[in-house]
Every structure is written in structure tokens, then in C-alpha cells.
């Protein structure tokens, strides 16, 4: 079953579920030829073909209810009570997931509001990015210390490694109220949300990832691959939000998207570390040796990422 056919069936089941619950009226009877009686479509005005479990699952999948649950989860992730480094990571994940879901719903929100919230969430992420980049660079260089042939060079590199960054506590304290405000801003739209615009937006996201993946196969520019990685990660968050539980192809798409974005993330971390070598206080010969080693590792990571690219059948036409 294709993604489009699955969504058409789920939309029919949801309409029947709301009619059974009395939320929507049943369609009015239409005249048909006695010789060729009109047969009702599956799940539309035909309660006998809709099981109780299907009805419960359809109502449970209402996007407004799912978004409300996601908002609670995002706020809980950034509240105090855990170690600061873990809290920084949890805050970045919550902000990225919130931005990805908002992109699915932006056509259902006023244009200025959608753009404004995307900008505010992006700014909050940028305040946390330097701390994360320093941790990644230090970890990668530590893993490559043993590649240097001389013991003296290894000691110099260890002394020059970036120090653990200060936790941006002020930025962390602003994220929970920001997400609380986002929930209040979205609350008037939760009841009116429907799956049709969400599905259309997700289909558009699939097409965007497909185009970027095609371009990445012809152009290995780091900026293009970074953009591809951002779109794939966004797609993975959006698939987690939509997540039809009884559609095997959808589960495979989510798993493949998460695997691909992880490999693209490894490539990006190596590229960031290569760029950061210019600010490392070590002799030029050590910097040159490290740059050559990291570039070889980045080339291998690039090939692994391309091998894990999403299948054309999953991305649609």
C-alpha cells in the first residue's frame, strides 16, 4: 500500500469515526438507479465496516491532541532536575522537534505568527550551538590523538584541546517559558486542526528531501550536504509526529531517516572540526597532520552517508 493510499483510507476511517461519535452527520441519502444501486465506500457512512479499534485509533490520531501531548513533552524536557549537559542536549532536541512540527502546521497558522515562532525557536537553538560544537570538537580530537606519531606532539595536542564550555544557563532558563508561550499561542488552533493539511505538508517535505538528495548525488559541497541533513532530520521528527502505527512502510521510512541523519551528522561534525583547527594553538605540522587525518575520515563518512540514502520508493514520485 502506498503512502497516499494509506492516508486516504485513514481519512475515510476518521470521518466514519466522527460520524459514529455524533460529531459529524452522516451523509444524506442520494437517489440511485434500482438496477445499479450505489454501494457505499469503505468506511464512509458504513459503520459495519469500521471496527472499534479502528475508531479508537483514528480519534487518538487527531493532530490537535498529538500536538498538545508533544508540547507537554517539550516543556518537561527543559525543566530543571537533570545534569546541565544532558539538559542542553534535551533542550536542543525539543527545539528542533518543535520547529519541525511547526513547519508541518505553518499553513494552518497566521503567516506572521508561524514565521515569528520559527525565528524565535531558531534563535534559542543558536544560543546553545557553541557549547555543543566545542564538546564535539574536543571529543573528535581526543579520539585522533593516537594518530600522531610522536609522543611530544600528542602531549601538545592534549594541552591545546578546547576547554569544556560554560553551560549557557541563562539561555536554558528562557527555553521553558518560550515553549509555554508557544503552547498558549497554538491552543486556539488545536481543535480545528485536521490531518489533510498535515499530510499535504508532509508530502511536500518528502519532495524537498528527494530533490536535495538528488542534488547531493551530483554535488558534494559541505553546505549542500548540511542542508540535506537538516531536511532529513526535520523529516524524521515530522514522521515521528505523524507516525501511523499499523503501516510497515512508514516505520521503515522513519528508521531509515534517523539512520541517514545520524551518518550525515557524523560527517558534519568532522567538517566542523577541520574548520576549527585554524583556531587550535598547536604547531603548523601538527595542524597539517590532523587536517589530513580528519579529511580522510570525512571522506569515509561521506561514503557511508551516501550509502545510507533514502530509497526512492520511500520518497515517492
Image: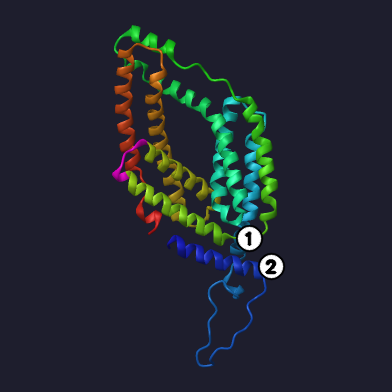
Mark 2 secondary-structure assignment:
loop
Range of magenta residues:
217-222
Position of residue 29 measured from the top left corner of the image (x, y, whole percent): 62, 83
Residue 180 appearing in the image: yes
The question of residue 275 being in magenta is answered with no
Q: Which image quadrant: the N terminus?
A: bottom left
Residue furthest front in the image: 112
Q: 10 Å neighbourhood of mark 2: few (<14), some, or many (≥20)?
A: few
Q: Quadrant of residue 182?
A: top right
Residue 310 appearing in the image: no
Q: Quadrant of residue 195?
A: bottom right
The alpha-carbon separation of the residues under discs 1 and 2 comes to: 10 Å
- What residue appears at the point 69 percent right and 51 percent down from the top-left corner? 187
> In front here: 251 or 310?
310
Q: How is the image coloured?
A: rainbow
Does residue 51 lie above or below 251 as drawn? below
User: In this rendering, would 235 be left or right of 172?
Assistant: left
Q: Are marks 1 and 2 in contact (CB under 8 Å)?
A: yes
User: In this rendering, would 182 be left or right of 12?
Assistant: right
The question of residue 221 being in magenta is answered with yes
Residue furthest bottom in the image: 35
- What residue appears at the point 66 percent right and 55 percent down from the top-left corner? 189
Label 1 sits on residue: 59
User: Which dot marks residue 21?
Assistant: 2
Mark 1 secondary-structure assignment:
helix
Position of residue 250 measured from the top left corner of the image (x, y, whole percent): 46, 54
> In front here: 164 or 17?
164
- What residue appears at the point 62 percent right and 54 percent down from the top-left corner? 110
Q: 10 Å neighbourhood of mark 1: few (<14), some, or many (≥20)?
A: some
Amino acid at each position: 500500500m502506498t503512502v497516499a493510499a494509506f492516508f486516504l483510507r485513514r481519512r475515510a476511517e476518521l470521518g466514519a469515526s466522527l460520524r459514529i461519535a455524533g460529531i459529524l452527520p452522516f451523509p444524506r441519502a442520494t437517489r440511485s438507479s434500482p438496477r445499479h444501486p450505489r454501494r457505499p465506500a469503505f468506511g464512509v457512512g458504513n459503520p459495519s465496516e469500521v471496527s472499534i479499534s479502528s475508531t479508537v485509533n483514528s480519534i487518538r490520531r487527531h493532530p490537535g491532541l498529538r500536538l498538545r501531548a508533544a508540547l507537554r513533552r517539550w516543556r518537561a524536557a527543559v525543566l530543571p532536575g537533570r545534569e546541565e549537559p544532558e539538559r542542553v542536549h534535551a533542550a536542543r532536541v525539543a527545539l528542533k522537534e518543535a520547529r519541525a512540527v511547526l513547519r508541518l502546521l505553518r499553513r494552518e497558522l497566521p503567516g506572521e505568527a508561524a514565521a515569528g515562532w520559527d525565528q524565535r525557536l531558531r534563535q534559542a537553538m543558536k544560543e546553545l550551538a557553541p557549547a555543543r560544537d566545542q564538546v564535539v570538537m574536543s571529543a573528535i580530537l581526543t579520539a585522533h590523538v593516537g594518530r600522531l606519531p610522536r609522543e611530544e606532539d600528542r602531549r601538545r595536542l592534549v594541552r591545546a584541546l578546547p576547554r569544556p564550555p560554560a553551560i549557557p544557563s541563562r539561555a536554558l532558563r528562557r527555553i521553558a517559558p518560550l515553549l509555554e508561550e508557544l503552547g498558549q499561542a497554538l491552543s486556539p488552533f488545536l481543535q480545528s486542526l485536521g490531518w489533510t493539511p498535515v499530510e499535504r505538508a508532509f508530502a511536500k517535505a518528502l519532495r524537498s528531501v528527494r530533490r536535495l538528495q538528488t542534488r547531493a548525488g551530483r554535488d558534494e559541497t559541505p553546505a549542500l550536504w548540511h542542508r540535506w541533513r537538516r531536511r532529513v532530520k526535520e523529516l524524521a521528527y515530522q514522521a515521528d509526529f505523524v507516525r501511523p502505527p499499523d503501516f510497515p512502510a512508514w516505520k521503515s521510512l522513519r528508521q531509515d531517516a534517523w539512520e541517514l541523519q545520524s551518518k550525515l551528522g557524523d560527517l558534519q561534525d568532522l567538517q566542523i572540526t577541520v574548520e576549527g583547527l585554524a583556531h587550535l594553538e598547536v604547531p603548523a605540522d601538527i595542524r597539517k597532520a590532523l587536517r589530513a587525518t580528519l579529511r580522510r575520515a570525512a571522506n569515509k563518512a561521506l561514503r557511508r552517508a551516501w550509502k545510507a540514502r533514502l530509497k526512492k520508493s520511500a520518497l515517492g514520485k
